Amino acid sequence: MKFKKNLFFLGLLILVCTGGVFAVSFFDDSGSFDSSKAENSLAQNIVSQMTDEQALAQTFMLGWVGAEPSPLIVNWIRDRNIGGVKIFGWNTGDTLLLAQTIGQLQDYALNTQFAIPLFVATDQEGGLVRHVKGSTSETPGNMAIGASGYPIDSYLSGYYIGRELSILGVNMNFAPTVDLFTKQDSVLIGPRSFGDDPVRTGILGAAFVKGLQASGVIPTAKHFPGHGDTDLDSHGVLPRIDIPFDTLWDRELIPYRLMVREGLPAVMSGHLAFPQTPAGGTPASLSSWFLKDILRDRLGFDGLIITDDLMMNGAAVFAGSVSKAAKAALLAGNDIIMFSKTPNLFDPIWTGLVQAMKDDPVLREQVRKSAVRILEVKLKYLKGDNAVPFVPDLNKVNEGLPDPEGTAFFLDLAARSVTVIKGQDTVFPMSPEKSGKVLLAGRYQDFFTAGEKAFPDAEFFRFPNRTGAELARLARGADTIILCLSDSDDLVFLRSLKDLGKRVIIFSVLSPFYVEEALWADAAIAVYSYAPESFIAGFSVMLGRIPAEGKLPFPLRNG
């Protein structure tokens, strides 16, 4: 595969030479690309030889439905040499098949006129959002990193997540999420956030970026300018966040201000409206004020801007159609327009943009500039010894997933992040022998698996397909109830225990926001994911086998 990758760059060199440019002058004495000269010059020369349609194709990133690639996505790659593909959860049930698919799609791309490889992107944030499943690691996630507080934990999370993606041929990750935990009752962001502190979020986000880069994977911070102050989901509607720009600048934008200075290579623009800013009701993803005036000019960002899925209602309904949203996104300053499904080859999404480039010199110039920027990033990241392979080695997929070193690290991170919210020294550490009759109540099998090892004689109560009254009846015969709390539905079961006079312990997973409504309980601990390691770590803290080192990454309003 290294030979094939070298052929790609040799082919680009020959192509540039035949265009009248002596590309050898862009090499340094060691024979490698000089990042300050060769990538930019070579990218410009390639784009100069492209038709408008070929340049436009580089701005397209498409998903497809199903485990195996459809003939339609193959046609987009083989006939148009689009810039990238997006891997979603519905593509990833079989890890080995995914690796084979990625290799196949890259082969199609490398056999086109310019032999430009694909960006292969996914959402592997860690914790709650893990689109590539199969045999990849389940990890504690961003809020656990925020609870540990160590930048090295963020760096290594990005690094080990990236190493697993690299084995599969995924070369771009839509992570880290640097949305602040501002609206704490939001179920959209929740534990995907590092916490509510913008400076800490920026530091941890920058560390995560460096970790992904060290693994060879291109990081993409999201959702610019910030999705944390709304409980609305832009998949269904366009959220409106009513804050002035001064607040935005000193809060949501601080992580980006920090990360841009550290060389952030890509940003995802969010379908979010900020009506108190000059953008008015226009989504940030379609706003030139946000993307050009603020992100490019004021923050000095020179990397790639990638839209969130333009098939989401937050963009498509506002613009009037997906094709209109695509045009508006490119004019606003996005370099890559992303679609979760595969449009037909001659859908208005494509034909409308081709015609618009003929009619509008501003759009044509924008698209060709974006194509140059896209190739610059590909030349920087998709070559060299640390680059993600175009065609994955299936033996490494079988042997390297989950990453053995990563498995050990993520267990350590889970342990470091466990947070005692209430009950230190009064309830914890617990003794199974002195806890009386224990009842474990929850919805996750891994909670019961870990809990049974900690309390071998415990009884189980599984919800949600039960009632709070049933739980109360069973709880009357117990001395200690440990309830796994993950969302507002679980609060119904928790409330049924309030007046029983029993010792109640909350085992919070995901966002610990819901603990605020139940501080009457005798004790509460928080872990931040439903990964097996997090349940093991939580029970270990309860029994005093390891110390509780985590700190809540946001204040409890009722605490």
Image: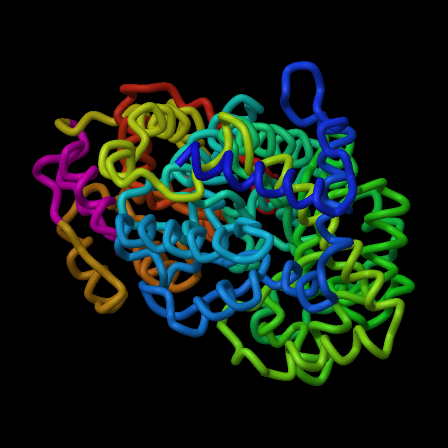
Up/down of 203 relative to 234, above or below: above
Quadrant housing the C terminus: top right
Q: Can residue 501 be seen here?
A: no
Magenta region: 434-459
- Residue 250: quarter of image: top right
Identify which residue is drawn at 74% across, 59% down. Answer: 334
Residue 496 is one of the magenta-drawn residues: no
Task: Report the number of numbered marks.
Answer: 0
Whole-percent x and y of residue 348? 64, 83
> Between 136 and 6, which is closer to the camera in this rendering?
6
What percent of the width, then of the height, locates residue 51? 72, 64
Residue drawn at x 76%, y 65% is 330
Q: Looking at the image, can residue 83 be seen?
A: yes
Q: Is residue 528 above or below residue 109?
A: above
Task: Please report the residue visible at 57 percent of the width from the left and 61 percent of the height from the top.
Answer: 82
Image location of residue 519, percent across then percent down: 46, 45
Where residue 487 sits: x, y (%)? 42, 58
Q: Nearer the viewer, residue 403 or 364?
A: 364
| Residue sitting farthest toward the top | 29
Residue at left offset 26%, top offset 52%: 444
Quarter location, residue 508: top left
Tell whether 528 sits left or right of 379.
left
